[in-house]
Image: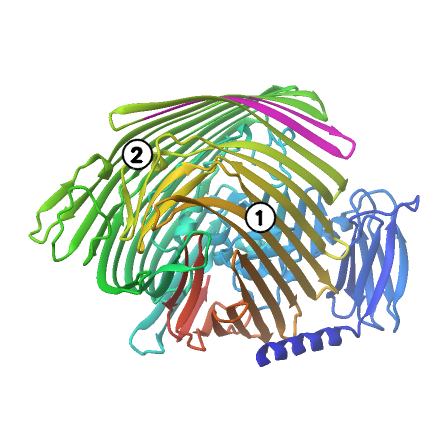
Amino acid sequence: MQKITLFFFLTFFAFATNAQNIRLEGTVTDNSKLGLEMANVMAVNQETKAMDGYSITNDKGKFQLSLKPNTKYILKVSYIGYATFEENFTTGAENSTKVIVLSEGMELEGVEVVREMPVSIKGDTIVYNADSFTTGTERKLEDVLKKLPGVEVNADGEVEVEGKKVQKLMIDGKDFFDGDTKLGVKNIPADAIDKIQVLRNYNENSILKGVENNQDNLAMNIKLKSGKKNFWFGDVNAGGGIDDNNDVNRFVTNPKLFYYSPKYSINLISNYNNIGELPLTIQDYFKFTGGFRNMMAKGGSSFNVSSNNLGIPLLRNNRAKEIDTKFNAANFSFNPNKKWTFSGFGILSQSQTQTETITNTNFLRPNSTEVASTQNSNQLANQNSTLGLVKLSTQFKPNEKFQMDYDVLSRFSKQDDNSSLFRQVIDENLNENSEDIFTNGNQEPVTINQNLSFYYTPTNKHIFAFETQHMYQEEDPFYNANLQTQPFEFNGFIAGQNRNNINQERFVKTSKLDSKLDYYYILTPKSNINVTLGNTNSHQSFNSRIFQILDNQNVNDLDNPENTNDVTYRFNDAFLGLHYKILTGKFTFTPGISIHQYNLNNEQLGTNFKLNLTRVLPDFLAIFQIKKSETLTYNFSLNNNFSDINNLAEGFVLNNFNSLSAGNRTLENAIQQTHTLGYFKYNMFNFENISANISYNKTVEALKTRALFDNVNQVSTIFNSPFADEAVSGRLLYGRGFLKYYKASLAVNLNWSKFNNILVDRNTFQDVFVTNEQFRQNYIFKASTNFKNVPNIELGYGYTANQLPNETFFTDSPTVKLDYFFLKSFSFVSEYEYFHYYNKDKTVENEYDFLSASLIYQKTKDSHWEYKLSATNILNTKILRDNSFSQFATSDSQYTVQPRYILLSLKYNL
């Protein structure tokens, strides 16, 4: 904590130093004395030619500049449609005020002022001038974005602007790897960036832009510097070192090449390392949708195809004992003419991961904190993963009235997981049993997604949109568990073997086709009617078998019906929707209704189970545009959520060595109603942004779990709960810039939930309904400086309180980051993270911290060569701890992470 106190002191000192500046305040008006909102105001130092201050007027035309006292400046003001104002003036020793009156008329100088402004607004587009915020320590797009007012980048590479998530990233108007933000923020060189454009109310299709509600859609376009166009640019980075154990040679090789011209672009990225960098995680892999949009969401139905994964842990950077990664990616776009666009990408990622985990799990009695049994385990696992993505897209737009889009995305992977585990079990009578368990899992799933869309507007009154998408998926997970004890009583199982070798094969195929035809009739410039005719058709098959390998290696097929699955499931949803959108004054209303006819049929165990349903689902959206940059939104929806085949197959599925589950063929849909109220405000005058929302969800007939425990082994089934699950969540994000050099934000997340399950009493075998309530609070405060010639500091503090039925757990997580560009050649960056986890009485408590640092030398800004000395996990943290909770059990885990290592890297900038 002494280190954190020191950094707080340095930040206070920096604030105090800047307090010597004086303020110039004033208003910008037109000839009628009416304040002009979003006028650009800047002060240029006549001696240094640097821009010492800038501001954008608020809704009353007010501006404020922080300037040096007794200094000569050129004051420039510009506003679209008005002549540029320019005046020489000298500041005094005290604060001063000024009224500026603009005359109608356009001058070229006004355009130049906008270009020089750090931030400017044109319609729905916010433009940031990158050089106005960089200090010299930035190496990639992520470093630049973190210094922009109103912009946040999280650890997963997701970008938020004004509290809304950026959904697409482009470079010079061309998609960067399907618009993925993580690959962009982690790889685009900072020195190539000229402007950053944030596109609000974004719609890829100009034909639908005026008739759909796009208030939550954000895209970001990176404008390259002129010297980076029509030339190859990028860098090649290579480094090596040793870790603290001196037994592993650490290395990283990371070449990145980019080429952009008006007709085509090429992006090439590779990353080979064993230092824990994961350019593509399994989470990122599933985020790539290839444009496979949830186009049926407006209809009110949800039929999601779940994944038959192996339960392989989704690891994050530097959070495993060993990680070895090989990553290659290529992206292209080509415009042969103004009508056609072709684009695509290919990604291949291979990783080898070793984990070591010690876990203590307590299984609870129903509606109690009393422990019924305990499982202690020490597991060493090796995971090999190959992930591949290939996408090809084309767009044909011969004129403004017609557009055709087509894309195909293929996803393939190969995953292997081998683990050895020592387990100790303590039952309710305190009897102990220990054994070694060996498991193996592998799968090679393949998914192909295709999209085809046509958009046509014959006149200004009529718009037709046809969209269809098809998904084909094959999954083949295999699981093997080799135990000393027999975990489950399978029919036909041969007991008395030296080892119990249990295996399961699964084969799941899915073919899903969504089609939708929309017709928009434009009643007036401010109102339209939308009629939708849509259909979802899915066909799935599920086959599985459990078998035993005996000591003599013979195979014992456990072919009893309860141990096998041969299921076919057909789902069809035909619907008709009607929506009416009207803009009246500051309000936009979009009421809607959809009528659905559902037909479900699953075949298994020699019989059919059919279900035919008719549902009417309403929805409603209201937007109150209080000001240009201030809105209040209310959204209501009623949704039918259907399960896929995985929850319907009634034969047992072996999830892992102590978990067995079975589906329920008679499951019906869950009905979910959602109410969301959102508020948004952005003030360019002081770079203040407020984003807040509160949401209420109530789910009836939710799919829940009925669990029976035999010691630590669980057998579960699924049912439609007669009790409603409820959740209330709220989020507040407040950010503001101060005096040009400071940026602060506060994020508050509150979540309350009530959910139900059934836990079978171990003694009476009676069903006991278990209802739990949970209230989670999370607060994150961040503050940072952005000076050009002195060290910059970023402080963060996170606090989490997780209130469970019988216990409350807390997490404190302060962070400190220091970056300093000095002697015109050196960049120093260091980051410290501390985590403290505990309960109210501190009977449960763990803490860990991470410290990293790097020193970079680049002779001049234009030098090709760059040298870097970096150290990771400087404090040599060896073990992290994690906790998880459910209605059935509590778990505490500790796992080994990579040791401290030092790298010397060399980078060549093209």
* Left or right of 498, for residue 884: right
Question: Magenta stretch: residue 581 in it?
Answer: yes
Residue 658 part of the magenta segment: no
x, y (%) of residue 635?
A: 64, 36
Marks 1, 2: nearer the viewer: 2
Please tell me whether residue 234 is drawn above or below residue 531 in the rendered image: below
Farthest residue to the front: give it: 764
In the picture shown, does residue 789 fall above or below 405? below
* N-term-proximal mark, 1 vs 2: 1
Marking on residue 280:
none
Circle 1: residue type: Lys
Q: CA distance from mark 1 to mark 2?
A: 33 Å
Q: Position of residue 190 (x, y in %)?
A: 54, 60
**Residue 811 placement (x, y as % from top left):** 54, 65
Q: Residues within 10 Å of mark 1 (few under 14, many from 20)?
A: some
Q: In this figure, what is the number of numbered marks?
A: 2
Q: Say if residue 223 shows up in the picture.
A: no
Q: Which mark is residue 165?
A: 1
Is any atom of residue 338 visible in this view?
A: yes
Up the image or down, 350 lies above or below 292; here it is below
Label 2 sits on residue: 509
The residue lying toward the viewer, choosing from 182 and 264, is 182
* Residue depicted at x 26% and y 53%: 657
Q: Which residues are magenta?
A: 577-602
Can you name the residue that lies furthest to the right here? Answer: 32
Helix, strand or loop at label 1? It is strand
Instruction: In this rendered view, identify the residue nearer to me: 833 or 861.
Output: 833
Question: From the viewer's perspective, is 6 left or right of 85?
Answer: left
State the SS at label 2. Answer: strand
